[in-house]
Amino acid sequence: MIINGRTRPTAVIGWPIAQSLSPVMHNAAYEALGLNWACVPLGVPDQRALLAFTEAARSLSFVGFNVTMPYKQAMLELCDEAASLAQLAGAVNTVHCVDGRLIGYNTDGRGLLESLENDAGFDPAGRSVVILGAGGAAGAALTAFILARASDITVINRTVERAEEMLARVRNNLRNTTAAAIPLGPSAAEAVRGADLIVNATPAGMSTSDPCPLPAEWLRQGQVVLDMVYQRPETALLRAASLAGARPVSGLGMLVAQGALAIDIWMGEGGGETRAPRDVMRAAAAAALEEQHAPAGGDGS
Ligand code: NAP
């Protein structure tokens, strides 16, 4: 990649940011697509820095930027416009900078569906789904499963009030899907055992020492278990899923798909039929993840 006077920046913002695979994955895609863009990681430590960055992004030559923890919900308020999917999800993970305006999107939900189809051949239509967590990623998953016509969705969260607020936001859009919020505890066992798909949308698993966020004995054969956390070696949840005979799906495929969908948005009409190269992005992200977890020499960043 050659950066010159005409290179346009993109960014991934969040805190902490050192572990993000997005810059490697995006830059590999730009190179394959022949785009003179460059993605940089920007650590945004607090709200003041977030406001300063969004103001700068309006006036500088940014194509757009991705937003990661903990700012996806705050970004919804900072955009000048937000796509209806982002509004329903209550979170923005992709911003397109257009003529000084910030247009917010949420590609996490569609990325999740794309990964479930590609990595597990799973279609949520008419199926029973459990989402663990009630933050930005869980909101995107909830919206995606409603649009994909899941039969029933149970949101399980430590703080059940947050799960209830999330459901209240989508209540009018449920159509034939039924939805419930329950606290993470023994009362969640039945919903987990009965589900066709379980999605972990909490950060539990980001540290290799994190325990399984659900009791392993609640999982069973025939289920698909997708952990949004991508970790090497696999997370405790995915280990438990394998042991139970369920199908484990790492969050890496979702990461690739949500990033690819962001690039598709940024290329817009100029991209014509061209789509971001998922295979190139996945190879770059997987190699960077391996490198982060290489035993000797690395500092993990
Ligand atoms: P968030 O907005 O901070 O929400 C975190 C949620 O997890 C909250 O509901 C919180 O519960 C719950 N939680 C936190 N720690 C927990 C624990 N130890 N045990 C049980 N529940 C816990 O975060 P987010 O943006 O939704 O992201 C969640 C995770 O998904 C992150 O690890 C992120 O990296 C990952 N993610 C991956 C992808 C991908 O493409 N693979 C995309 C998006 C997000 P309370 O409400 O009780 O605090």
Image: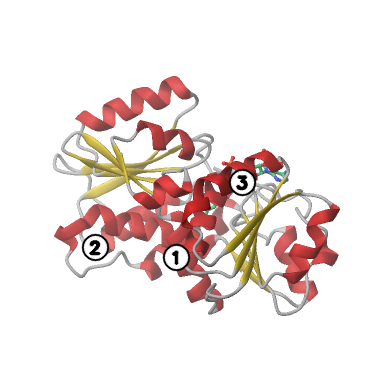
Q: Label 2 is placed on what type of residue?
A: Leu
Mark 1 element type: helix
**Of the residues tagged 2 and 3, which is closer to the observer?**
3
Task: Determine whether 276 is above or below 246 in the image.
Answer: above
Q: Position of residue 114 (x, y in %)?
A: 45, 69
Residue that badge 2 annotates:
33
Mark 3 element type: loop
Residue 43 picture quarter: top left
Residue 290 picture quarter: bottom right
Residue that badge 3 annotates:
134
Label 3 lies in ligand 1 vicinity (Cβ under 8 Å): yes
**Residue at 20% of width from left, 29% of height from top?**
59
Q: Label 1 is placed on what type of residue?
A: Arg
Task: Determine whether 95 is above or below 113 in the image.
Answer: above
Mark 2 element type: helix
For marks 2 and 3, the one nearer the N-term is 2
Tell me how many marks there are: 3
Residue that badge 1 annotates:
282
**Residue at 50% of width from left, 62% of height from top?**
146
Q: Position of residue 65 (x, y in %)?
A: 34, 43
Label 3: few (<14), some or many (≥20) within 10 Å? many
